[in-house]
Image (cartoon, helix red, strand yellow):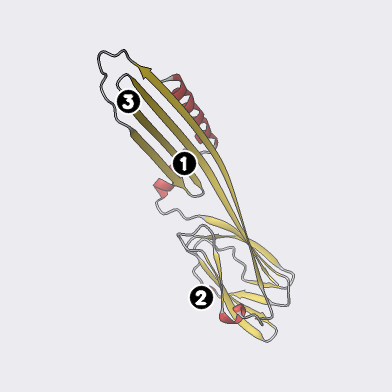
Amino acid sequence: MSVEIAQLHSEVEALVEKFDVLSKIKEIQEAGDVRSSVPVTISVTTDATISLLEDKSTIGESTEAPKSLSKGEKSSFNITQGDELKYTVTAGELTSDFKIVFDVDKSAPKLKLSDELEDDNAPIGFETTKTETKTEIEIEREVEVEKEWTKGKKPERKTSKETKHEAKAGAHSLQHEVETKFKQEKDKSETETETEIEISNKKVEVEYVIY
């Protein structure tokens, strides 16, 4: 192994250790179906009251979801993939419902309103703020080797290759890609190796304001 490659591996190992990527990958492999959770905040700023319909909701780990909120009240909790929270909302003479749905293949929950709440003349409105923070570390290294020969004996021809490794664990992901290109002429060859390592972590927060 060349000095450059050894140094690169050392850098990658340090970053993987710093971000605890390997333990996250092991955790998801051992646990099987690990579902992500997202912090959610609900606040009511108008004359309205919302109430959780537990019998019509799918609640796995989102047990801290508020049962009821009225004007001036606010609640923060975590909602987990696969959960669906259904609420009734009363504002004056209007009584309707809405849902907060977090599908297992999505990175954030989605607000689904009834037709009455979607109407332009509805007495209340919903403001959704999604904040997504992604921390990403990327290392790119390019090594180019050029060889030349005398006009006599022709060397053996080599082939190009590419390897790629990806792993994900919850909000963490690791990608390692190595591509080697080889070009040969009668008296000269060029080998170019590009190595790219990307470690990323994504955090999503959602806030719903009923106004």
Residue under the image location 48 percent in, 27 percent down: 8
Reading the image, the residue beneath label 3 is 184
Q: Residues within 10 Å of mark 3 (few under 14, many from 20)?
A: some
Label 3 amino acid?
Gln
**Of the pair 72 and 110, the residue shown nearer to us:** 110
**Left or right: 177 in relation to 117:** left
Q: CA distance from mark 3 to mark 1?
A: 33 Å
Q: Residue at x 58, y 54 (%)?
A: 204
Q: Tag 1 or tag 3, which sits nearer the N-term?
A: 1
Q: How many discs appear? A: 3
At mark 1, the secondary structure is strand
Q: Is residue 29 visible?
A: yes
Indicate which disc, 2 or 3, sits on the residue closer to the N terminus: 2
Residue 72 image label: none
| Residues at marks 2 and 1, CA–CA distance in whole angstroms | 40 Å
In the rendering, at what x and y percent does residue 27 appear? Answer: 44, 45
Task: Write down the residue under mark 1.
Answer: 174
Category of crowding for the residue at label 1, using alpha-carbon neighbours closer than 10 angstroms: few (below 14), some (14–19), many (at least 20): many
Instruction: Point out the frontmost of discs 2 and 1.
Output: 1
**Looking at the picture, does residue 164 appear above or below residue 121?**
above
Residue 64: give x, y in percent of width and height.
Answer: 59, 63
Q: Going from the N terminus, do you reach mark 2 or mark 1 first?
A: 2
Residue pointed to by mark 2 = 55
Residue at 43% over, 43% down? 167
Q: Height in image: 127 above or below 163?
A: below
Q: Bin the neighbour count of mark 2 within 10 Å (Cα to Cα): few under 14, some 14-19, many 20 and up.
A: few
Q: Is residue 171 above or below residue 41?
A: above
